[in-house]
Image (tube, rainbow, N blue to C red):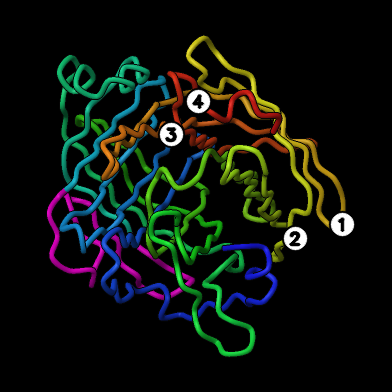
């Protein structure tokens, strides 16, 4: 969406948007839900995602479990689907119990249990050389914040804007900080979870290669203090900042943001310093990555070009003022000549 289009739109969100939408005829239509949760006391957490690509006949299913000793259990599948009516694929299901207030995530299936999660940079090796073990997840998520985001519509007509499927990442998107309670069991070891996290939902045309890079930092310090910080570059040059700070029961929009990252020899983030400003005050947030798994998405264009997107998912300990919290640091980069494109751009 261009800047002029953005100025002529308003954002709307209705309870029915929690349920799935008509996919229409857009081939790369994707409707997805994502949840993360970390139990601050136990150091156990995870994230879960289903992305329905019904017009392509499959779903993207991901389950990622962070264990307190640094091991990660991970599974990714592309199970076949024929409907966008529900989120239920590959052993993972998401149910809306009460819109904006209560949702339930369940997974029953396998995960690849990685002692060295960096092996997932080569999935064939990772899944061959590590044990595949049983995993069961049953977590209820409850909203602890207002909703953030929605779908853009024309300010005058109320119609949704047209998308360019080739250049789109999503046409609608919203997020919410949550509390998650339930159980996670991996290879016979069970954990009672009482944690905090963030969920999001998006729908519309999506190619993972539609943007150059982004930095996405969802975190929670308590039920009264949480953040989501984002930097997005569609073209690799211009950067759009976004996000919000939850204080009490109110979100404050982030007006300015910068992220300075530290890297290892593989260009994986090991730490970060984020500086943000709302209308109320400025914050400095420090992040220390405790465990990280590198993921990828590959696509061949109609012209035969091979495109590679890397997404690094870091379980991250955050500090701000005197508060300590947990969350994720999710870095997406297109890979050009073997280098993540966003690493040499001041963020």
Q: CA distance from mark 4 to mark 1?
A: 35 Å
Image quarter (top left, top right, bottom left or bottom right) of the N terminus? bottom right
In the image, 229: left or right of 322? left
Residue corresponding to mark 1:
280
Q: CA distance from mark 3 to mark 4?
A: 10 Å
In the image, 112: left or right of 273? left
Contact check, label 1 and label 2, Cβ < 8 Å = yes
| Most foreground residue, 229 or 167 | 167
Residue corresponding to mark 2:
252
In the image, 198: left or right of 87? right
Residue 219 in sight from this viewpoint: no
Q: Is residue 345 magenta?
A: no
Task: Please tell me how crowded label 1 is: few (under 14), some (14-19), or many (20+) other residues with Cα within 10 Å.
Answer: few
What is the magenta range? 79-104
* SS label for mark 1: loop
Image quarter (top left, top right, bottom left or bottom right) of the C terminus? top right
Residue 265 x, y percent position in the rendering = 51, 9
* SS label for mark 2: strand
Q: CA distance from mark 3 to mark 1?
A: 32 Å
Q: Is residue 61 above or below residue 272?
A: below
Q: CA distance from mark 4 to mark 2?
A: 31 Å
């Amino acid at each position: 969406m261009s800047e002029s289009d953005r100025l002529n739109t308003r954002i709307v969100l209705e309870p029915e948007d929690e349920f799935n939408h008509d996919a229409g005829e857009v081939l790369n239509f994707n409707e997805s839900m994502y949840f993360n949760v970390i139990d601050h006391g136990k150091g156990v957490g995870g994230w879960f995602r289903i992305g329905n690509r019904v017009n392509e006949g499959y779903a993207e299913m991901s389950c990622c479990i962070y264990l307190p000793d640094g091991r990660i259990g991970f599974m990714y599948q592309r199970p076949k689907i024929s409907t966008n009516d529900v989120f239920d694929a590959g052993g993972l299901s998401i149910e809306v119990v009460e819109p904006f207030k209560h949702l339930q995530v369940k997974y029953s299936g396998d995960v690849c249990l990685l002692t060295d999660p960096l092996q997932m940079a080569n999935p064939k090796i990772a899944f061959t050389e590590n044990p595949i073990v049983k995993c069961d997840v049953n977590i209820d998520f409850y909203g602890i914040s207002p909703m953030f985001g929605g779908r853009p519509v024309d300010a005058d007509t109320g119609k949704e804007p047209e998308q360019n499927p080739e250049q789109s990442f999503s046409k609608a998107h919203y997020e919410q900080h949550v509390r998650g309670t339930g159980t996670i069991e991996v290879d016979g070891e069970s954990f009672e979870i009482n944690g905090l996290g963030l969920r999001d939902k998006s729908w519309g045309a999506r190619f993972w290669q539609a943007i150059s890079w982004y930095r996405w930092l969802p975190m929670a310090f308590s039920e009264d203090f949480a953040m989501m910080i984002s930097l997005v570059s569609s073209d690799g040059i211009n950067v759009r900042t976004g996000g919000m700070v939850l204080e009490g029961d109110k979100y404050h929009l982030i007006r300015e943001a910068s992220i300075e990252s530290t890297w290892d020899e593989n260009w994986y983030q090991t730490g970060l310093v984020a500086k943000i400003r709302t209308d109320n005050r400025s914050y400095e947030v420090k992040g220390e990555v405790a465990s990280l798994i590198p993921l990828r998405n590959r696509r061949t264009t109609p012209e035969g070009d091979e495109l590679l997107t890397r997404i690094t998912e870091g379980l991250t300990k955050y500090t701000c003022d005197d508060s300590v919290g947990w969350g994720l640091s999710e870095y997406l980069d297109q890979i050009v000549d073997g280098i993540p494109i966003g690493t040499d751009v001041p963020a």
